[in-house]
Image (cartoon, grey):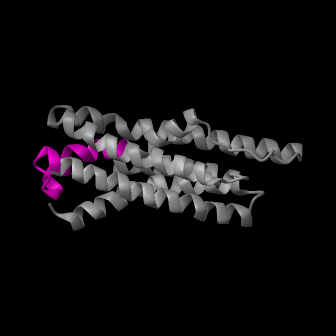
Amino acid sequence: MDYLALFGIAVGLSMDAFAVALTNGAVTRNLKLKHALGIALAFGAFQAVMPTIGWLVGIAGRGIIESVDHWVAFILLGYIGGKMVYDAVKEAKSHEPKECRDPISFKMLMVMAIATSIDALATGIILPSVVGASTLLLMLTAVGLIGLTTFIISFAGVYIGKKFGDLFSSKAELLGGLVLIIIGCKILIEHLFLS
């Protein structure tokens, strides 16, 4: 197995999750270890599960997945980002500070985890040929390393985002929402015009 290529793929796939983890860390007013672990675990698990599903679907389903994955990510991230921007503008107009809470529900966490891991679904189709994971054991090792890498990067992202959010707390949710919208647009543009 080509571990260097696998690590590159794992880091590349985890960048959207990292950006969303940054956003979640920035808007969490009372960050606890369980929040950071939950975000990192959800993102890491979906980054491991999605390429496994893609691998199982195989070449027959590749065209179907690639034809809609970018639209699904764009819509989900655009919705979440738009809601964050709306809430931030609404809060700024009301001049009432938000209560300290965990701003991400389980349902929203699952939506974000799916949205940031859709590219991994398509990657799972080509992963065996890229990293030489031709057997089930090698494939499971590959997706395990992808999930672990994403977990670590996302966990760090939450705390980096928290530091950013503490410095710019009044604008963190607005900027975080804009970041999610930009990530969704980036995914859509890359698939429509650059692939």
Q: Position of residue 164 (x, y in %)?
A: 66, 65
- Residue at (78% x, 57% y) in the render: 170
Percent position (x, y) of residue 86? 71, 41
Left or right: residue 136 versus residue 39 is left
Q: Where 152 falls versus 118 (above or below)?
A: below
| Residue 99 visible at all | yes
Reply above or below: 14 against 61.
below
Looking at the image, residue 191 sits to the left or right of residue 177; the answer is left
Residue 162: in magenta span:
no
Which range of residues does the magenta coloring cover? 118-137
Horizontal side of residue 64 vs 71, given as left or right = left
Foreground of the two, 152 or 4: 152
Please provide percent x and percent y for residue 90. Answer: 79, 41
Q: How many marks?
A: 0
Main secondary-structure element of the magenta-colored stretch: helix
Question: Which residue is pictured at 21% across the width and 33% down the height?
Answer: 57
Indicate the position of residue 31 as horizontal and vertical percent values. 67, 54
Q: Residue placed at 49% from the left, 51% from the top? A: 40
Report whether 52 appears left or right of 29: left
Q: What residue is at 24 percent from the left and 53 percent from the top?
A: 142
Determine which quarter of the picture holds residue 7. bottom left
Q: Is residue 195 visible?
A: no
Outermost residue toward the right in this view: 95
Image quadrant where one finds the N terminus: bottom left
